[in-house]
Amino acid sequence: MDYLVITILSVVQGITEFVPISSSGHLVVLHSILPEIKINELTFDVILHLGTLLAVIVFFWSDL
């Protein structure tokens, strides 16, 4: 069940990061709706944001 929740949170983070709505706000709402995961929510959210940053750097590496 944890993997399903983590996948849902990751997909929502990835989709909402690049549109003019709060990706962090969506994560907070989803944390309250979905079952709890066994890791710290703040740490998990920071890791999701770092993953998004890494994906952007890799995608735009030739432009950087």
Image: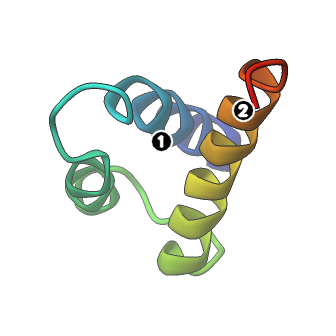
Q: Which picture quadrant has residue 63?
A: top right
Which of disc 2 and disc 1 is earlier in sequence? Answer: 1
User: Where is residue 56 shown, x and y percent of the image?
Assistant: 65, 32
Query: Which of 60/46 is in front?
Result: 60
How many residues crowd around disc 1 within 10 Å: few (fewer than 14), some, or many (20 or more)?
A: many
Q: Which mark is residue 58?
A: none
Q: Is residue 37 visible?
A: no
The residue labelled by disc 1 is 9
Q: Nearer the viewer, residue 61 or 50?
A: 61
Task: Tell me if 22 is positioned left or right of 17 in this view.
Answer: left
Query: Which residue is labeled 2 in the image?
Result: 55
Instruction: Kindly identify the amino acid type of the residue bearing the numbered disc 1.
Output: Leu
Identify the residue shown where x is 30% and y is 56%.
24
Disc 1/disc 2 C-alpha distance (Å): 16 Å
How many marks can you see? 2
Q: Quadrant of the N terminus?
A: top right
